[in-house]
Image: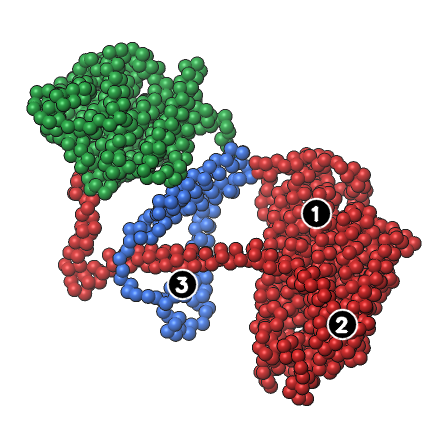
Amino acid sequence: MKEWTFIAILLIVSAMLPTVPIMGGRLLGPRKPNEQKSSTYECGVETVGDTWVQFKVQYYIFALVFLVFDIELVFLYPWAVAYNRLPLFGVIAGVVFIITLAEALIYAWRKGALEWL
Amino acid sequence: MNLPTLESINLAASLPVLILAGWACLLTAIDLFISPERKHWTAWLAVLGLLASGVALGFEAVAYSQRGAVSAFGDMAVVDGFALFLQGVFLLSAFLGILLALNYLPRHNIERGEYYTLLLFTTSGMMLMAMAADLIVVFLALELLSLPLYVLSGFAHPRLDSEEAAMKYFLLGAFASGFLVYGIALTYGGAGTTLLSGVVEALVGGGPAPNPVLAIVGMGLILVGLGFKVAAVPFHMWTPDVYQGAPTPVTAFMSVGAKAGGFAALLRVFLIAFPATGDTWGVVIAIIAALTMILGNVVAISQSNVKRMLAYSSIAHAGYVLVAVAAARYPEVEPLAVSAAVFYLLTYAVTNLGAFAIVIALERDDGTGVEVEDFAGLAKTRPWLAIAMTLFMLSLTGIPPSAGMVGKFFVFQAAVQASVGDPLILTVTIIGVLTSVISAFYYLRIPVMMYFRDGEGQANVQPALGVALALTALATFLLGVVPAPFLQMARHALLTLAG
Amino acid sequence: MDGLFSIVPLIILAPFTGVLINVFFGRKLMPRRDSVAPGVIASSMAGFSFLIAVLMFFALLANPAGAEVPVLTWINVGDGDFTLHIPWTLKVDTLSSVMMLVVTGVGTLIHIYAIGYMHGDIDEKAASRGLEGEEALDFKRRRYARFFAFFNLFLGSMLVLVTANNYLMMFVGWELVGLCSYLLIGFWFDSPEKNEAGQIIGVLNSSAGRKAFVVNRVGDFGMLLAIMLIFWSFGTLEFDDVFARAECMIEAPQAECLTLSAAELAPQGEGEAAAEEHGEGEARALTTPIALGPFAPTLGVVVTAITLLLLLGATGKSAQIPLFVWLPDAMAGPTPVSALIHAATMVTAGIYMITRSNVLYAMAPVSGMVVAVIGGATAFVAASIAVAQFDIKRVLAYSTISQLGFMIAAVGLGGYIAGIFHLATHAFFKALLFLGSGSVIHGMEHGHHHAHGQGEHHDAPHGEDERPFDPQDMRQMGGLRKHMPVTTWVYIIGALALAGIPPLAGFWSKDEILLDASLNSTLVYILLTVAAFFTAFYMGRQVFMVFYGSERTEAARHAQESPPVMTIPLIVLAGLSVVGGLINLPVGGLHPLGRWLEESVANAHIASFNILVATISTVLALVAIGLSYLLYGRKPLEEGEADPLYSTGPVFTFLNRKWYWDELYAAIFVRPYNRLGDFLANAVDWQFWHDFVHDRIIADAFQGWAAILSRPIDLGIVDGAVNGVAQLVESTSRSLRRVQTGYVRNYALAVLMGVVAILAYLAIRFLV
């Protein structure tokens, strides 16, 4: 049961990590709203145009390209943790993995998937 | 912590697959730098990869004949006669698939290098499937096999029926993959391992044997996932639409490769992992086989489109192989049934690829010309083509002197042996024989059309297609006339437990 | 006497207390504009630390082996084959004691000096901003307290660095002093130095701070890598254990040595024996394999890598080639900062660190040679640049770089005693020179105001308009000897000490370095000797330009001597510069510092005095001073007259532009980096991230979803459910029409029925 306790603690801590600062900021911070502060946050840029616009399917292509990195991360993390104990083969396997994903990215790039039409 | 070592991975044994997969990766990158007018270079480079893989396979076969089966990737894959034989079939199919496409793609203005690289990817998936000795590897191979095929089905984009085919195939394929994964998960839950050799222990009663019921439900779902791939009733419904919509070379390759890949997994998983529950799945598969043969052959009669007809024919042929699978559950019949199944797959591969080659020759640039009527009068305009088509049709029906006859004979022989004391198998065997008679109706309609109807049969045989035709026709004929050497090889195509 | 060691934490505690007091109460402690309470508090804290340092010195006299005083356990994680235990333990030995004495001693004097200097400086800045009355007072309160808080923070951080007993704690101090350096360089972050014409003169203070910070990051990167490599190879970061294990690995395999701890070794015998034995067999190949993941380089390779990476750290902090470019710009900070941080103490951290790691350097002769050559080259290059500068502080800045080069060269050649000796004497006379220059600047500013108070611009009858007033420009000085006698005399003492004229402090320490160089490497010896020649020349040039001849501006004519709070520390430092050489006087085999350091520096060796080397360097220094007299002293520069060195044309320009070093970095690093930054900002962030991801993907996706989800619901609530549902169905079917023929779901249904049938069969079979 012990290992599950750690998972429970992890869940609790991971839930607290975002909520505590947000709640803390809300409870402790002074609030003096003005028009500027209350406006929608858009990376420091004024919002432009109508909010009702069509949504492009190319989003998925980008999401897929993003997936390349995502998967890379998911797999490389345990790899990196165990790196010290890996035999040379493990290192090579990791490198091959990265190269393979890099090739996928290059392919997508070269095929123009990164261009927004 | 048990880390894999080079010895346990046994790269040499997996070399054919690794070469092909690696070359596919490389070729994807190389293709980026080949100009659109020179995409045939990609094709020849792909053929080069197939050749290299074939050479490696040859060495493996020689080694196998000396030292027997070996396992690779720490028992997750096994190189035995079964795997080697089917890998050969896959390489051959892929080679023919490239030949069929070489002229077809530019003619239809859909020539892109990805065709060849995707073909290599799916072929490596099939080859991995033949080696898979672990359910995870089965799933991996299945996805590696399927995903490129989804894309290839839609390769004639922006032709709508091609896109539709791809979408349907993808949606239903994902659906079926879901069942497969679920089945694998349940099996793991029931047996505590995904290794086929481990599952068998768990079910036989050795080991901790946690929960056999879970594993049996898992087995049922795995059957669904693989049944979809081989287009067995009732998981077949995607087949006609996809075969008709997909570009013809893709259809040809898919009907052969994907089906054989599915059977490779079906045979190995059920015979290695679930022999203990053979009486259960034997019944299910026998019933499915009967339904498949009946439905495929009956519905094919009413088709006027040749591609669609060949699609139903492909369903029907899956039924015949399933008969062999059902028969293989009896240990004393197993070697015969397994070699019958793989030999049948070989004969079906060469025959069906040949038949599709003829369809490609007749198909016009706009995708029409594949109705049965379009064959009228072909005997006069293209006599050699007509002879070849007749040979293929005979082979598909199972009439001598053709490969199909030998294959069917072999399967029925195994089935009859198994039917001793098993009325269900006997019934299914009889259904099989009857439906092959029915199939003569629609297969032979084409020779009749070619020889006895007047018409302006048009065909366009370009060099690569001609080579493919010649090869398949020759193989179909030879396998029918002198099948002995190949039978000998098929006899060696035995399943081995990993290790 | 050993119990005395346990009070050593107070040495760090005191300055940090000063920080807290000045941060929280500093402003309240200044009721009037001439209040000095924050400065007095900070200075007394520094003085208290000095007292502790002296006590430690006496404790060490009684027990030279020193002690390690645990304060707390900082990091303690892991078990089995991976443990990381980092205590915060203060190491008191003879080496750290020397550093403590120098840091606190010179630091206290400079703190006292700053009490007076910052008064004038802040008033000056307040006036230049047009602040008056209450505003000016508030401004002064903030800045005065802040300055001393930072100053004390620096002192405490530096003590953290020198008392650390492991590399990580040292790194903490290393970073803390870097932070203080940054904060103090940019002390006037909000005011670029401007003249009346509104032109920015010198470097923007904040960008000078940033430059220092960024350049130091490069070095810190090497330092961090070195620390990781040390931990990986030796399994510990504590100095003594690292060295013990490293020496153990020369003979035994890595695994056997990993549990070794210095405490287990005999306190004296074995360590020394190993060191001596090692001294004999220099050429021994260190072939023990060290496991680093999948690789197993030999011990020699690992140690060389570690020491080279440490060297990279040292080149950052101690301003050596290639990372010295930040130090001249750092002179934008107030003069006490330049004196304390950027001359006397912080910049010597690199020398201290290398000396501390002497065991590792002894094992890596290649690294030692690299260190020496870098030091020698830096000494030469910086000295040559200093010859052609006009800014009084800039000359001293390059001089500092050059002198640091001497020390680095010394420690690179194994002359650890010479390096530390020069470190100490240099701290005296360079602090003196900087504070002297601060006094000069102070006087010039005073004179400038005085002149302006009497009449507008009557000091600039002709030709002066093109050259706006700059209190640091030596061309605008001249003749200050008449107005600032004390400053003049102490400055001349400092200059002579720096030039290496016997019997002043600089002569002894520099001579020892030259001696080490002459024994070990001719190349380094030549570089250092030429650098020493330049040193004497530029100091002569500076003294003659600043203090002799006639006044070249009104400001110089009205310059005033600084108040005693500034001149008294100067006099003390001047005294130290005169007698500082005594601490390691080579006469009669005395070498007190050498004997002292031998206790803690395993590879220290004492060089005997060599009359030839000493004579050569003295003669060269005298010749250089004579040369400067010929050029600047015999016929002093007149108002508006050009420097005689201009006659050397391109050579002068080359030196004046600092060998175009900044331009080189701009071309190699800064501009490509800016272009990359442009690319990242404009292309990646703006075009891709903002325009594309945000505007298109996120915004469009959000709006798309919102359109699908909320519009029907909205309309449904407002206009009636029927409308909304119909619209939803219609839009869905429209979007799916192309692929949805209605069959797929039938197919899927068929599959599902098959599944149900199979499962039903299985269920019947096994459950019924």
Q: Which residue is mark 3?
A: A43
> Which quadrant holds the N terminus of chain C?
bottom right
Mark 3–mark 1 Cα distance, whole angstroms, equals 48 Å
Q: Which residue is mark 1?
A: C370
Q: Chain of mark 2?
A: C
Residue at point 25%, 20% (across, down) = B470
Amino acid type of disc 2? Answer: Met
Tell me the colour chain B is drawn in. Answer: green
Residue at the extreme bottom of the image, as rendered: C454
Residue B200: x %, y % from top left: 36, 24
Number of the front mark, 3 or 1: 1
- Relative to C139, say whether B178 is above or below: above
Q: Chain of mark 3?
A: A
Residue C176: x %, y % from top left: 63, 60
Mark 1–mark 2 Cα distance, whole angstroms, equals 37 Å
Q: Given contact means CB atoms under 8 Å apart, are the residues at marks 3 and 2 in contact?
A: no
